């Protein structure tokens, strides 16, 4: 399974929670921190569980999330 990294733009995040609800691996959680607009932002609480599916980025109404997947190294025979 591919591993992924979720990058959240803290200042764009409005803490709506859609990404939390759709993450199949329960990777994301609300942070104890707030952004400059006063929203409780999301962060990767369990990064080791991320599979890089990008459901979080696809559902974010504020385009505050980007997902990067680790590429598998190609083996030569």
Image (cartoon, rainbow, N blue to C red):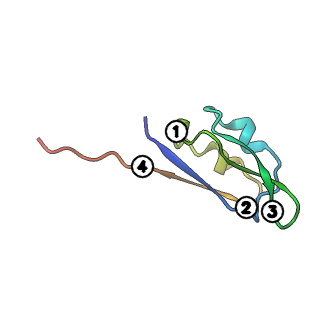
Find disc 4 in the rendering and name its residue: 70
Tell me the element at label 2.
loop
Tell me the element at label 3.
loop
Image spot of residue 10 (x, y percent): 73, 61
Mark 1 or mark 2, which is nearer the start of the sequence? 2
Mark 1 or mark 3, which is nearer the start of the sequence? 3
Real-space CA distance between mark 2 and mark 1, rounded to the nearest whole angstrom: 21 Å
Q: Residues within 10 Å of mark 1 (few under 14, many from 20)?
A: few
Mark 4 or mark 3, which is nearer the start of the sequence? 3
Q: What residue lies at 63% left-to-right and 43% top-to-bottom?
A: 55
Of marks 2 and 4, the one in the foreground = 2
Q: How crowded is mark 3: few (under 14 residues within 10 Å), some or many (20 or more)?
A: some
Q: In this view, does 23 lie to the left or right of 11?
A: left
Find disc 2 in the rendering and name its residue: 10
Find disc 1 in the rendering and name its residue: 48
Asked if labels 1 and 4 touch by Cβ distance under 8 angstroms, the answer is no
Find disc 3 in the rendering and name its residue: 35
Q: Residues within 10 Å of mark 2 (few under 14, many from 20)?
A: many
Asked if labels 2 and 3 touch by Cβ distance under 8 angstroms, the answer is yes
> From the viewer's perspective, is residue 7 above or below residue 56?
below
């Amino acid at each position: 399974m591919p591993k992924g990294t979720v990058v959240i733009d803290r200042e764009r995040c409005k803490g709506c929670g859609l990404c939390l609800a759709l993450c199949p691996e329960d990777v994301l959680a609300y942070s104890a921190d707030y952004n400059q607009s006063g929203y409780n932002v999301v962060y990767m609480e369990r990064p080791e569980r991320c599979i890089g599916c990008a459901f979080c980025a696809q559902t974010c109404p504020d385009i505050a999330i980007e997902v990067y997947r680790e590429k598998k190294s190609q083996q030569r025979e």
